Image (tube, helix red, strand yellow):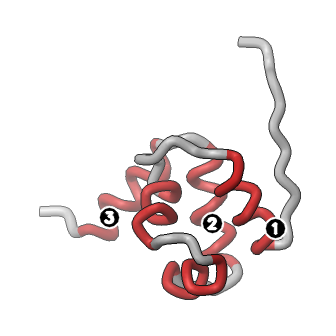
Amino acid sequence: MRNKKQELKELIMMQGSIAQQLHQIRISKQLTMEQVCCQTGMPDYILDSMEIGRRSLHFPELYLLAKYYGKKLKIEFVDE
């Protein structure tokens, strides 16, 4: 039986790059989910859902996290 951490890693790898980037940025900055939520005012269930790709991404939330992480947010249209 797989544990929750293994399942989370697999979900992150399967999800779009934004979910993966959100998780990797937080981990690289050695921040816990609780720290990010406390300092941004974002509920933990939203950040968790965003990081594993189970939540639709909304610009205001992405902008808040980009600003908090000291990153720029780039949105672009590409040909299929």
Q: What residue is pinned by disc 2?
A: 24
Q: Secondary structure at mark 3?
A: helix
Within 10 Å of disc 1 (Cα), the crowding (few <14, some 14-19, many 20+) is: few
* Drawn side of residue 77 relative to residue 51, left or right: right
Q: Position of residue 69 (x, y in %)?
A: 77, 72
Name the mark nearer the viewer: 1 or 3. Answer: 1
Q: Which amino acid type corresponds to the residue marked 2 in the rendered image?
A: Gln
Tell me the quadrant of the picture where the C terminus can be found: top right
Q: Are the two marked residues, 1 and 3, in contact with CB atoms closer than 8 angstroms?
A: no
Q: Position of residue 2 (x, y in %)?
A: 19, 63
Along the polypeptide, which appears first: circle 1 or circle 3?
Answer: 3
Which residue appears at 73% of the width and 64% of the height? 64
Name the mark nearer the viewer: 1 or 2. Answer: 1
Q: Position of residue 31 (x, y in %)?
A: 61, 85
Along the polypeptide, which appears first: circle 2 or circle 3?
Answer: 3
Q: Secondary structure at mark 1?
A: helix
C-alpha span from label 1 to label 2? 16 Å
Q: What residue is pinned by disc 1?
A: 67
Which residue appears at 58% of the width and 54% of the height? 20
Q: Which amino acid type corresponds to the residue marked 1 in the rendered image?
A: Lys
* Drawn side of residue 50 relative to residue 36, left or right: left
* Drawn side of residue 19 relative to residue 46, left or right: right
Name the mark nearer the viewer: 2 or 3. Answer: 2
Q: Position of residue 48 (x, y in %)?
A: 45, 64
Q: What residue is pinned by disc 3?
A: 6
Q: Which amino acid type corresponds to the residue marked 3 in the rendered image?
A: Gln
State the count of labels: 3
Q: Is residue 29 above or below residue 24?
A: below
* Drawn side of residue 2 relative to residue 48, left or right: left
